[in-house]
Image: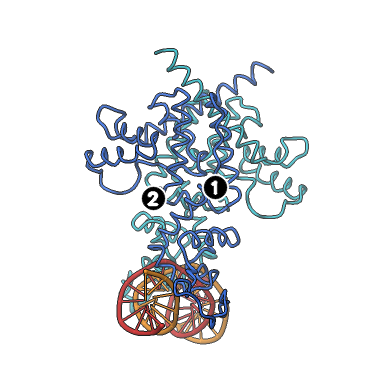
Chain colours: A blue, B cyan, C red, D orange
Amino acid sequence: MGRMPRRDPTAAIAPRARQTPSLSRDGIVAAAIELADRDGADGLSMRKLGQALGVDPMSLYHHVRDKDDLLDAVADGVVAEIEPVIVPGDWKASLRRTILAARATLRRHSWSPGVIGSRTGVRPATMAYMDTVLGILREGGFELELTHHAVHVMGSRVLGFSQDLFVDSGDPPPDPEASAMYARQLAGTYPYVGELALAATHDGGLGPCDDDVEFLFALDLLLDGLERRHDGTTTSL
Amino acid sequence: MGRMPRRDPTAAIAPRARQTPSLSRDGIVAAAIELADRDGADGLSMRKLGQALGVDPMSLYHHVRDKDDLLDAVADGVVAEIEPVIVPGDWKASLRRTILAARATLRRHSWSPGVIGSRTGVRPATMAYMDTVLGILREGGFELELTHHAVHVMGSRVLGFSQDLFVDSGDPPPDPEASAMYARQLAGTYPYVGELALAATHDGGLGPCDDDVEFLFALDLLLDGLERRHDGTTTSL
DNA sequence: ACCTGAACACCGTTCAAGT
DNA sequence: ACCTGAACACCGTTCAAGT
């Protein structure tokens, strides 16, 4: 019930340290991940998180806008743990090993696919991860359009759940000028994400991402793959 | 606020009809789907559902064990709307059109992939749907093992979210004798589901479903598919 | 048999107040 | 600047009581 002060509270301390900054955004996110690891996604409430940190639940709101913001940060925190593997000159091995690394991380936090899948806001670590995946394909010689298809095909396998970067939010269709500017800004930090975003908004490029087209592309790729495996078994037997 | 009685309550009625059975399980499920269509998955609460039906929230508990049970039924209700398409003698067209039908249904209830994905209990309509999908493959000449791989490959595309039928529940590993009996019983109503379940439990068959094996099978099928598309673009240009 | 209402143990979050 | 506590508007569900 009572909080354990880290130092004797009666001791004279320099004013800067008078109050240890017991709370920080990163600390909160880390504690949230730990709590979810222990109690699952349902056990992660603002109230229990405050309790775990020995702090009034309301104090959290000074470092986090609301629970949605916290969950965005938590999802990004898990993605940040993924360690992509680049095998130079081999896009297939790179993508394979990177996706297996992602799977291993999400497995360590078995509740995470659900919360990652429910997020709409894409934060820095997730952006960086997507940039890495896109980079593997582009550097492997994939054209921009096929690269785009590829991330849709991989869908849930890239991040435990399909995460559409540039569509989906119920927002009104953004002004093309504004999104082009956003894309150019993105390109500064995430070159491959920016490139794709620019192509999707720019009229000279791919055009806006079409859900139906992506679904059919992925579906037919799967059906072709199954057919090939099927023919393999029937001819060899 | 007040409820509209369907008949003048003072009129003398035969005792059977004295109280119109205003509540039924099917009616509750239908109302829940309607409510979710209007307010989304978050708007579907026992309290609001009771209100929508003009009934005390607690009355629902006479037809539904708890909210989990309701959501299981709701998920099954959505799946029941899917109309599979069978093109005789063409497994590929059948599977393609059936999956597109599933997608169309889930799109009509945009909140449904989330709740279907979160369910663990598989109800009749979902069983029947899985049986149809498995039947398409088996009748198309797929071996049992490849059929099993296939549904994992299709994963989220079959039902908006990957739904592992025979694994995943955190239950202790079931006694093989018991699960074999369960599988044989399943086979009575769902022949293809039963066949697969039997093979997965029986020692002469496939052995228990291995998540890692399935993940790798699907991943490599995707990578091969992408490689093929990739080679297609690089040689043709 | 079916429905009800009060009550309990939880949520996220606003707002005014403390240091 | 940061933390707090009371309060509000919600949840799902148990339990004893009504018809």
Residue to which mark 2 is pinned:
A121
SS class of the residue under badge 2? loop
Distance in Å between CA atoms under marks 1 and 2:
18 Å
Residue A228 point in image, percent of width and height: 57, 21
Residue at x-position 49% and y-position 25%: B226
Q: Which chain is home to disc 1? A: A
Which residue occupies the foreground of this view, B159 or A62? A62
- Circle 1 packing at 10 Å, graded few (<14), some (14-19), many (20+), is some
Q: Residue furthest top?
A: B236
Residue B22 visible at all: no
Q: Quadrant of the C terminus of chain A?
A: top right
Residue to which mark 1 is pinned:
A81
From the viewer's perspective, tell me whether residue D2 is left or right of residue A157: left
Which residue occupies the foreground of this view, A137 or A116? A137
From the viewer's perspective, tell me whether residue B112 is left or right of residue B212: left
Circles 1 and 2: CB atoms closer than 8 Å? no
